[in-house]
Amino acid sequence: MSRILVVDDAAEIRNLLKRTLTAHGHAVELAEDGIEGVDKARTWEPDLILLDLAMPRMGGLSACQHIREFSQEPIIVLSVMGEEQDKVRVLDAGADDYITKPFGVEELLARIRVALRRSAGTPTPSVFSCDGLAVDLDARRVTVDGREVHLTPIEYSVLSYLVRNAGRVLTHTQILAHAWGPEYTGELQYLRSFIGQLRKKLGDSAARPHFVLTEPGVGYRLRSPDWA
Amino acid sequence: MTISRKLPTDLLLSVATVAAISGGIGAVLSRWQTGPLSVVYILGILWLAAARGRTAALLAACEAFLVYDWFFVPPFHTLDVEQPQEWLELGIFLVVALVAGQAYALQRRQALQAAEHDRHTQLLYELSTELTVQENLGRMFDRMLAILAEGLGLSGLRLYVWREGVRELSGGVEAASDGVSEPVTSVYRVPCRIGDRELAEMEVFQKSDGQPLTEDDLRVLQGFGNQMANALERRRLEKEEQLNQVLAEANRTKSSLLAAVSHDLRTPLAAIKASATSLLQAGAAFDEAERREFLDAVNREADRLDRLVRNLLDMSRIESGALAPRLEWHNLSEIAADVIDRLQPVSDGHELQLVAEDREFLAHVDYVQLSQVLTNLVDNAIRHGAPLAPVRVCVADGQVWVENHGRQLSEDEREHIFDRFYRGEGLASGTGLGLAIAKGVMEAHGGRIWADNTPDGVAFHVALPAGVPAVVA
């Protein structure tokens, strides 16, 4: 189905991922560190790259920067809990998404699906629909279970950005730069309160939001219909 | 230098004394014809011996001899003598004057030396007492040096301690420069030794009155130097002893940690191994439900291992002081819900409930660390709660508490429950790390954590420092 390059220094993870991804119909190539990864990203021309963050010789961040010099194929970063700052750095350096180890295979496959769909250039349908939330991007109309929701221009701007990237993590910086402009990227409080209001208007619970999910220390992610 | 400086004064005083006495004798002799009065000079000579020392006394003796001969022994105004017994008289006078002056001066000097010696002994005693009593050597160097410099009348004193081959200035006193006197120069170095090892060195500056250092001063300085060396050595040994204790404690900690951890690591590993080998068994016929049970066990126990490893990492970060929370405004109820959702599948039948209004409870916390605290508290509440009794996580502004139903805490448990490796009473399992980590994290956040008995169980409270985010509308 797709060509996936797995870059990880742990042999067990590499082999397990190869087996799982192959079983789901993907062609898989393996690399042991960042240098080999960059090399194979150039020669083997994968459709998607799974990239570990902490590796000997060349780590995930440098590898991501190198790969972005010649390729725009999606990169999903594999990381562990507590590396939030590294995650943000690698996402801002052009990685598409991340997943925290230890992860379930289902979750990984969902991330891969979202990333591949985006890179395949499938145009975002003009109406996004997921679990009762509907966003009509042409008409700028938002409904929850058929009821219309009135959003301020900035709230709508944030939501539509999330919708166009549904299923994918967006960093605080990315959202702020998109909705307010690059000079506001430090204003986390703006974002915090706007997301709070947005959730309230979408009928989302503060403790267990269903649509706009928090990626602690990194950013936000909109639930994707692909996940189900 | 001493002699040349004292000599003019001695000469002047001796001449004045002899002149005064001679005047007196002259006055007496002019009225009354009386016997030899040369003995009166002895009084003056003794006074000079006492006041000025040997030189002045000897000068006065010679001057008195000449003046008496010149003025009062016939023929007058010559050094000649008429009667032979007068020579004898003069000779005896000279000898008596010299001997008396000398003896008196010697005795005076000895008395002065004894007094000085006493003073120095007293000084050394005070300093050595100071050295023994003081716990903190570093802080008192200056004070000790000040006492010593003042006692000996020194214009300055510095102490250099040898540290790994480098001379390091560790204290010193210097007389305030009045801008007039010449700059003080160091005149002497006193090594502070134990055996052959030189631990420190004192740099001694000249005396304030310009006098040279006496033998006695040097003796005091050397005595102090030796005591200083002893004190430094004692401090080194004390430090070494402290370090040894710390290392021993660390060793004990490591052993008990390893014991607790290997037990706790083995439990989920055993479950995973058992499940996996069951599934691998050739010829075993499991139905779908049974296969799923084994796989669920593997999944669940892997999560348990993950939590344990995270705790171990946190513990080592707390121990090494590397647990720096990355504080951001987070919604406490969201963190609590996330923890509940992750633990519900492994709660052994305890229902995990979130009690919170549906709104944001913002707090300035490290998301990962606070979620670890709540995970540990909920895990603890499950393990110590009555079977199947619900565990509640309650959220309010700046506070989260975890309640269970079950056995209450004894006084001893309440006191020690947050200590490392404390396992509480009863048969509970666990590394005794979870609550210690929770406490460490809360302290790093500037918050508090405590346990209270409730009417039918225990509540663990977490309080975060108050603060309201600047919300920009």
Image (cartoon, coloured by chain):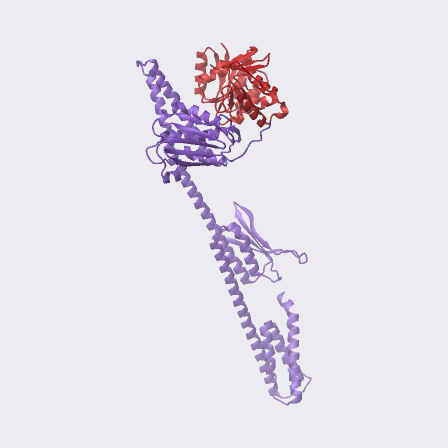
- Left or right: where does residue B445 sit relative to residue B40? left
Residue at the spot 34% in from the left edge and 34% down from the top edge: B407
Identify which residue, B461 or B356, lies in the foreground: B356
Identify which residue, A67 or B201, lies in the foreground: A67
* A126 w.r.t. B22: above or below: above
- Left or right: where does residue B404 sit relative to residue A52? left
Q: Position of residue A34 (x, y in %)?
A: 52, 21
| Residue most extreme to the front | A147
Q: Position of residue A122 (x, y in %)?
A: 55, 10
| Residue most extreme to the right | B77
* B398 w.r.t. B207: above or below: above
- Marker count (numbered): 0
Residue at the spot 51% in from the left edge and 53% down from the top edge: B192
* B28 w.r.t. A106: above or below: below
Identify which residue, B74 or A96, lies in the foreground: A96
Determine if residue B308 is in view: no
Chain A appears in which tint? red
Q: Position of residue A102 (x, y in %)?
A: 45, 22
Residue at the spot 61% in from the left edge and 85% down from the top edge: B37
Determine if residue B69 is in view: yes
| Residue most extreme to the bottom | B33
| Residue most extreme to the top | A1
* B52 w.r.t. B149: above or below: below
Q: Which chain is purple?
A: B
Q: Position of residue A187 (x, y in %)?
A: 59, 27
